[in-house]
C-alpha cells in the first residue's frame, strides 16, 4: 500500500502538492508521510476534540508527529469522534481538494462514512478519484465509475 500511495504522489511536483488528511491510523498516516517525504505540504482535518483518543494507542505517536508537521490544522466543531464526525471531516476534505486518492477494495462501506461513501460523494461532486487497491483485494469493477 505504501508503494502504491507513493507512486501516485510521485506524479505531482512537490511545490504544488498539498495533502489533506485526518491522520487516521493506517492509510491516512501512510499518505501523510508520503506527502511530506515528497516535499509537499500537509493540512490536517481534526473531526472532533476526542478524535485522537479514538485512534489505536499504537498510532498516537505517529499522529502527534504528523500533526506537528502540518502547515494547517482544521478543527471541526464536534466533541465526540463517531461516524458522523468522520463523514463531516470527509466532506470538508473533499470541499478543499482537487482529487481524492482512496485506498479501497471496491466493497460497500462497513458503516456510515466508510471509504465507499467517501468515494461516492467525491464522484457526485465531480472530484477526480484515484483508487489504490490493497494487495490481495478483489476488485469490483462495478464499484468505481
Image (tube, rainbow, N blue to C red):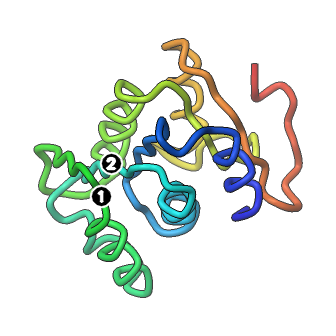
CB atoms of marks 2 and 1 within 8 Å: yes
Q: Earlier in the sequence, mark 2 or mark 1?
A: 2
State which quarter of the image contains the C terminus.
top right
Name the residue rendered at 69%, 34% in the picture.
Answer: 130
**Residue assigned mark 2:** 43
Left/right placement of residue 58 relative to residue 135 reads left
- Residue placed most toward the observer, 34 or 59: 34
Left/right placement of residue 2 relative to residue 43 reads right
Q: Quadrant of residue 38?
A: bottom right
Q: In this rendering, is residue 77 above or below 136?
A: above
Q: Quadrant of residue 127?
A: top right
- Residue placed most toward the observer, 143 or 112: 143
As helix, strand or loop, the secondary structure at mark 2 comes to strand
Q: Residues within 10 Å of mark 2 (few under 14, many from 20)?
A: many
State which quarter of the image contains the N terminus.
bottom right
Left/right placement of residue 18 relative to residue 51 reads right
Name the residue rendered at 40%, 44% in the picture.
Answer: 20
Name the residue rendered at 84%, 55% in the picture.
Answer: 137
Q: In this rendering, is residue 145 above or below 34?
A: above
Residue 105: x and y in percent read 75, 48
Total numbered labels placed on residues in the image: 2
Residue 126: x and y in percent read 55, 12
Q: CA distance from mark 2 to mark 1?
A: 5 Å
Residue 61 is tagged as none
Q: In this rendering, is residue 68 above or below 104?
A: below
Left/right placement of residue 76 relative to residue 104 reads left
As helix, strand or loop, the secondary structure at mark 1 comes to loop
Q: Residues within 10 Å of mark 1 (few under 14, many from 20)?
A: some
**Residue assigned mark 1:** 70
Residue 94: x and y in percent read 42, 29
Amino acid at each position: 500500500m505504501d508503494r502504491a500511495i507513493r507512486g501516485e504522489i510521485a506524479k505531482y511536483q512537490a511545490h504544488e502538492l498539498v495533502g489533506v488528511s485526518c491522520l487516521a491510523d493506517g492509510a491516512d498516516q501512510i499518505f501523510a508521510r508520503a506527502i511530506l517525504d515528497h516535499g509537499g505540504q500537509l493540512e490536517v482535518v481534526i473531526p472532533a476534540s476526542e478524535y485522537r483518543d479514538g485512534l489505536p494507542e499504537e498510532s498516537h505517536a505517529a499522529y502527534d508527529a504528523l500533526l506537528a508537521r502540518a502547515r494547517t490544522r482544521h478543527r471541526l466543531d464536534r466533541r465526540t469522534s463517531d461516524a458522523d464526525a468522520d463523514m463531516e471531516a470527509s466532506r470538508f476534505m473533499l470541499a478543499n481538494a482537487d482529487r481524492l486518492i482512496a485506498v479501497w477494495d471496491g466493497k460497500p462501506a462497513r458503516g456510515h462514512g466508510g471509504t465507499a461513501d467517501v468515494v461516492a460523494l467525491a464522484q457526485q461532486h465531480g472530484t477526480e478519484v484515484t483508487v489504490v487497491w490493497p494487495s490481495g483485494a478483489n476488485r469490483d469493477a462495478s464499484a468505481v465509475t
